[in-house]
Amino acid sequence: MSNTVSEPIKDKKVTKLPIGAFIKQYNLFLIFIVFLIIGSTLSDKFLSVQNILNILQQSSFVGLAALGMTFVILTRGIDLSVGSVLALSGMIAAYLMTSGVHPAAAIPITLLAGTALGFINGFISTKYKVPAFIATLAMMVTARGLALLTTDGQPLYNLPESFQALGGTVFGRIPIPAVIWVVLTIMSVIVLKYTTFGRRLYAIGGNPESAKLSGISVDKHITITFMISGFMAAAAGILLSAWLTVGQPTAGQALELDAIAAVVIGGTSLFGGKGGVGGTFIGVLIMSMIVNIFNLLGLSSYYQSVFMGVIIVLALILNQYIANRK
């Protein structure tokens, strides 16, 4: 009679994602959810369809500028001229149309002008090794001066109705600028994640010297990122003029700071090579939600500035902490 010895039961390993790792991986989304909860708790109007559409509308102009800014920052650059390029582009479009140029021609010319301004930023920065901060600071002052010089600081009215329609809505409610912002964001995600060009930008941001030694034309790619930033700022200027139904030379003041803040909150490193436009998209929404909550509560804009500054600092600290932990 043989004795049968049963095999010991092996403990099954249960794979769990540590809470700390989960928070690090989804910190931006969690912050977004927190502000959704705070907003809906403080005001019953916060999650209304109309308010959400308002947030998207108000986010789109900064969002487009921040979209281009992300490309530049990924390569260790900075673009301080986006607000001024936005204003100048809006004035160029308005001036052309009030001079009799059809919007179908005025819009491409304006986009080309914004892209050209971006090229100048990139060319000066790479060809003459001028720090991007200085090159774009000079462009910021110059473009703002040109915007004011166009009409001696006066707004341009009587824009064509066909152009004003760009600042309107589709299906009666959805703002067109927001739709364009979302579409361009999706296109940018695809470019950065699935194309050779996008991978090269991350390589340049990670280590420019190594990227150069591996055969990547660093200067050319950096210049292209500034051109993308100029194009996006021009698009924002066109849409803002269409929404306001006026060409405003003072538009976009301090917009560059909001764009940089959105990129930082979105998790893109100011040292380049890390981040993406998806995070920037959420970062812009978080900033707009904060402003919207304060507006719904009727609080002063001074409180908004203080709170926004705190949020930016905390985002920087969180991003640095995550980078060190990795």
Image (tube, rainbow, N blue to C red):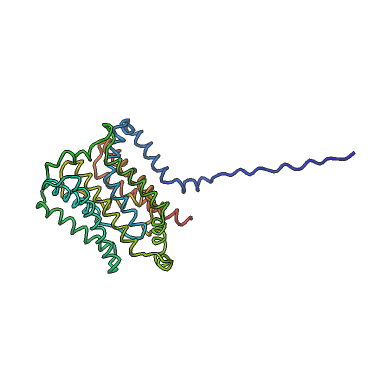
Q: Quadrant of the N terminus?
A: top right
Q: Residue 71 location in percent, x, y?
A: 34, 55
Q: Nearer the viewer, residue 222 or 194?
A: 194
Left or right of 321 in this view: 4: right
- Name above or below for residue 130 compared with residue 90: below
The answer, for residue 253, to whether it is visible in the render is no
* Residue located farthest toward the left when viewing the structure as drawn: 152
Image mark count? 0
The answer, for residue 2, to whether it is visible in the render is yes
Q: Residue 174 location in percent, x, y?
A: 29, 35
Q: Residue 131 location in percent, x, y?
A: 29, 65
Q: Residue at x 16, y 38 (%)?
A: 161
Q: Nearer the viewer, residue 43 or 254?
A: 254
Residue 241 found in image quarter:
top left
Left or right of 152 in this view: 46: right
Q: Nearer the viewer, residue 283 or 113?
A: 113
Q: Residue at x 76, y 42 (%)?
A: 7
Q: Residue 34 location in percent, x, y?
A: 39, 40
- Name above or below for residue 153 compared with residue 217: above
